[in-house]
Image: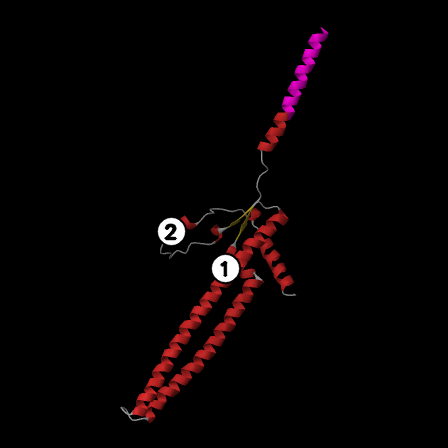
Amino acid sequence: MKRHLVGISVAVAVLATSLVGWEALAGRLMASPTVVGTVDLPRVLEALEEWQSEVDRSRVAAEQFQTSLKQRSVELEALDADLEDFVVGTVKYQEAQRVVKKAAIDLRAFMSLAEMREARTKQRAMLRIYNHIREASGSLSERDGYGLILMNDSAIAIPEDSRDVLGDISARRVLFASTAIDATQPLIDFMNTQWRAAHGN
C-alpha cells in the first residue's frame, strides 16, 4: 500500500514538473506583441523646425540669386547697348561684340551653376533630415516602447490626375492605419526639442 502511495506521489510530482516546464516553454514561445506606430512623413517635415530652417536658408539663397542675376542682366544690357557706339565691321565693334557674347555665356553659366548648387544643397539637406528622422524614430521607440514605426503612406492621397495610378497604388504599403497608433506628433515634439537644445533655444 505504501509503495502504491509512493508511486502515485512520484507520478504526481513528475506530472507537476512537466506542467511547469511546459508553461515555461509556452511562455518563451508566445512572444509579447510588437507595439507598432505610424508616422505621416509630410506632416512631420512641415512641422519640423529643422526643416523650416532649411526652407528659410533656401529662400535667402533664392533672393541672393535673384539679386545677382538682376545685376548681371543689367550689366549685359549695358554692354549690348554700348555696341551702338561702334561702327559695324570695325575692330572696336568686333571687340565689343566679343565682350557681349562672353558676358552672355557667363550669365548662362552662372544661372546653370547656381541651380545645380542649390539642387545639390537641397538634396543633401533632405537626406540629412530624413536620416535624422530615422535616428529620432529609433530613440523615440526606445523611450516609448515601439517595436516598429512605419511611414503611413495611406495619409498621402493619390491625385486624380495621376499619370500612373496603378504605379502609385503599387508603391503604397499601408492601406489603413488607426489614429490610435499614430506617432507623428510625439516624433515632431521629440525632434523639435532636440533641435532647440542643439541650437540653444
Residue 20, compared with residue 32, is above or below; it is above
Question: At x 36% / y 90%, what residue is drawn?
Answer: 82
Q: Is residue 158 left or right of residue 53?
A: left
Tell which residue pokes out farthest to the top in this image.
Answer: 1
Question: At x 59% / y 29%, what residue is drawn?
Answer: 26
Please identify the quadrant where the N terminus is shown: top right
Q: Which of 77 and 157 is in front in this view?
A: 77
Q: In terms of secondary structure, what is the magenta stretch mainly?
A: helix
Residue 164, compared with residue 120, is above or below; it is above
- Alpha-carbon span between mark 2 and mark 1: 24 Å
Does 6 appear in magenta? yes
Numbered tag placed on residue 73 in the rendering: none
Question: At x 63% / y 29%, what residue is drawn?
Answer: 24
Q: Which of marks 2 and 1 is nearer the N terminus?
A: 1
The picture places residue 47, in percent across and down from the top left corner, at: 56, 60
Residue 132, compared with residue 105, is above or below; it is above
Q: Which of 102 and 25 is in front in this view?
A: 102
Tag 2 and tag 1, C-beta contact below 8 Å: no
Q: Is residue 12 left or right of residue 136?
A: right
The residue that label 2 is drawn on is 167
Q: Label 1: how many residues lie within 10 Å, few (<14), some (14-19) or many (20+)?
A: few
Three-letter residue code for mark 2? Gly
Marker count (numbered)? 2
Q: Give the range drawn in magenta.
A: 1-20
The residue that label 1 is drawn on is 127
Please identify the quadrant where the C terminus is shown: bottom right
Does 89 appear in magenta? no
